[in-house]
């Protein structure tokens, strides 16, 4: 009734009287729903009618802090403190201001002072815990959040913060001990079981993680997060059919997401059910057309069933979304090679190099394509350039051997062959694969034979 009366007053020229408690309730309502302009109006009118109300002045301070008018807030707090020096809200607001100024030690000092005057300390403990988190002092943060849990075991905000502190310290075993102790007193907390499962997952204790997630979804059959984590754990245990079943449950409980469709597709792919995988990757791409990962997976799955034209179409889709991704250009090049589109493959490899994807595999693949189309000089120039950055690389040395032999530079060829055989004798089969004519020369056969005796 007070709220309706207040809003009616704002729409007319009428002025109604409210007591200070009514104003405080109206202001708190607007703060709770995020209507700060109306909250400010209520504070203004409230202080006109009750200029000495400390509670309304403290609400004014809260609004000033929210609007980052910190100097005004400090001045008003000083006036309030002169009247009520032991008001716990004064200490809390001082702490809030210091926290906004990143003076977290000072904030902690005032919050601890407020505990001397407050009846219910839980909210202040939580605030102190947050200040310690800002300071990266996770041990002290843990101790204060634990105090909150001791008072109210359903304080899930504090529980999540405790788990976060353990995780940021990478103390997963410590977190497991804490959660197991918590569950002894609160065995029907699906949140705690879920968090326990996540810690076991980090520790690669997948069977224990699975048991924890089982309890989480048993307690709450509509717990989507529990089913998702359970499905991921089943994947780690190579139980892909069961994983698919749990992912499908999440689709029944909530709107479908591209993420879930992708996970289902990947499970099918692990089972070598490529048509089914493609079906779900398509669903993911439909759900989120700008998700380049979905198009990449579609391309890779299509390659596996030798549908390279579709694979090329899908990787082009991924490149339209992110043409700066070197992985996509590598896949694009690989597909073009399979389709005998060598010029496009070469352009793709050079694009990789331009984007900084100058890894040895890109250079080798590019050199092999240049070799295949008979551009020996270009392949040779490329490998000589690369050799400066990748010394002692057998893959480069064997190819230099073959190219120099094809270009009638036998001495250079045999020199590189000796280096290659010294670096990795077992890899010498690459000469037979890429340079069969070179492999059949007497000099090459003789040198390989001599090295074979040494490596025996």
Image (cartoon, rainbow, N blue to C red):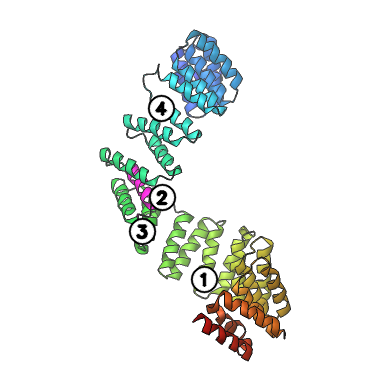
Judged from the image, the secondary structure of the residue bearing numbered disc 3 is: helix
Q: In the rendered view, does 20 fall on the left or right side of 436?
A: left
Q: Nearer the viewer, residue 199 or 240?
A: 199
**x and y percentages locating residue 286 in the rendered image:** 52, 59
State which quadrant residue 146 falls in.
top left
Q: Is residue 155 visible to the viewer in this orientation of the structure?
A: yes
The mark nearer the N terminus, 2 or 4, is 4
Asked whether the beta carbons under mark 3 and mark 4 sit within 8 Å of each other, the answer is no
Question: Residue at label 1?
Answer: 302
Question: Residue at label 2?
Answer: 254
Q: Which mark is residue 230?
A: none
Question: Residue at label 4?
Answer: 125
Work out which quarter of the rendered image holds the N terminus and state it. Answer: top left
Asked whether the beta carbons under mark 1 and mark 4 sit within 8 Å of each other, the answer is no
Question: Residue at label 3?
Answer: 234
Q: Nearer the viewer, mark 2 or mark 1?
A: 1
């Amino acid at each position: 009734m007070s709220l309706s009366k207040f809003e009616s007053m704002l729409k007319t020229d009428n002025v109604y009287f409210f007591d200070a408690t009514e104003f405080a309730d109206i202001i708190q309502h607007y703060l709770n729903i995020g209507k700060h302009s109306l909250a400010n109006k209520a504070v203004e009118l409230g202080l006109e009618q009750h200029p000495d109300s400390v509670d309304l002045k403290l609400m004014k301070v809260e609004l000033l802090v929210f609007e980052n008018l910190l100097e005004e807030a400090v001045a008003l707090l000083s006036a309030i403190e002169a009247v009520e020096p032991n008001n716990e809200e004064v200490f809390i607001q001082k702490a809030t201001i210091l926290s906004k100024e990143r003076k977290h030690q000072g904030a902690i000092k005032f919050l601890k002072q407020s505990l001397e005057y407050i009846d219910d300390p839980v909210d202040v403990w939580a605030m102190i815990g947050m200040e310690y988190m800002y300071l990266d002092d996770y041990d002290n943060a843990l101790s204060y959040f634990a105090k909150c849990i001791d008072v109210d075991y359903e304080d899930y905000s504090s529980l999540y913060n405790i788990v976060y502190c353990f995780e940021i310290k990478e103390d997963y075993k410590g977190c497991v001990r804490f959660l197991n102790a918590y569950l002894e007193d609160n065995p029907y907390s699906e949140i705690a079981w879920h968090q326990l499962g996540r810690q076991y997952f980090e520790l690669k204790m997948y069977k224990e993680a699975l048991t924890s997630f089982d309890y989480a979804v048993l307690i709450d059959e509509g717990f989507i997060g529990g089913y998702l984590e359970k499905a991921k754990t089943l994947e780690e245990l190579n139980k892909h059919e069961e994983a698919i079943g749990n992912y499908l449950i999440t689709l029944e409980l909530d709107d479908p997401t591209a993420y879930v469709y992708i996970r289902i597709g990947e499970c099918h792919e692990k089972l070598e059910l490529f048509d089914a995988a493609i079906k779900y990757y398509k669903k993911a791409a439909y759900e989120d057309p700008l998700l380049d990962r979905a198009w990449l997976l579609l391309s890779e799955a299509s390659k596996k069933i030798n549908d390279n034209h579709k694979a090329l179409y899908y990787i082009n889709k991924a490149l339209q979304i992110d043409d700066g991704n070197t992985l996509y250009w590598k896949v694009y090049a690989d597909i073009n090679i399979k389709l005998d589109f060598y010029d496009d493959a070469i352009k793709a490899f050079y694009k990789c190099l331009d984007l900084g994807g100058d890894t040895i595999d890109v250079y080798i693949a590019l050199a092999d394509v240049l070799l295949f189309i008979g551009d020996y000089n270009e392949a040779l120039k490329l490998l000589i350039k690369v050799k400066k950055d990748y010394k002692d690389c057998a893959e480069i040395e064997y190819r230099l051997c073959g190219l120099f032999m094809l270009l009638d530079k036998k001495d250079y060829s045999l020199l590189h062959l000796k280096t290659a055989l010294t670096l990795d004798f077992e890899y010498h089969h690459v000469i037979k694969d890429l340079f069969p004519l070179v492999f059949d020369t007497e000099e090459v056969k003789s040198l390989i034979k001599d090295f074979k005796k040494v490596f025996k």
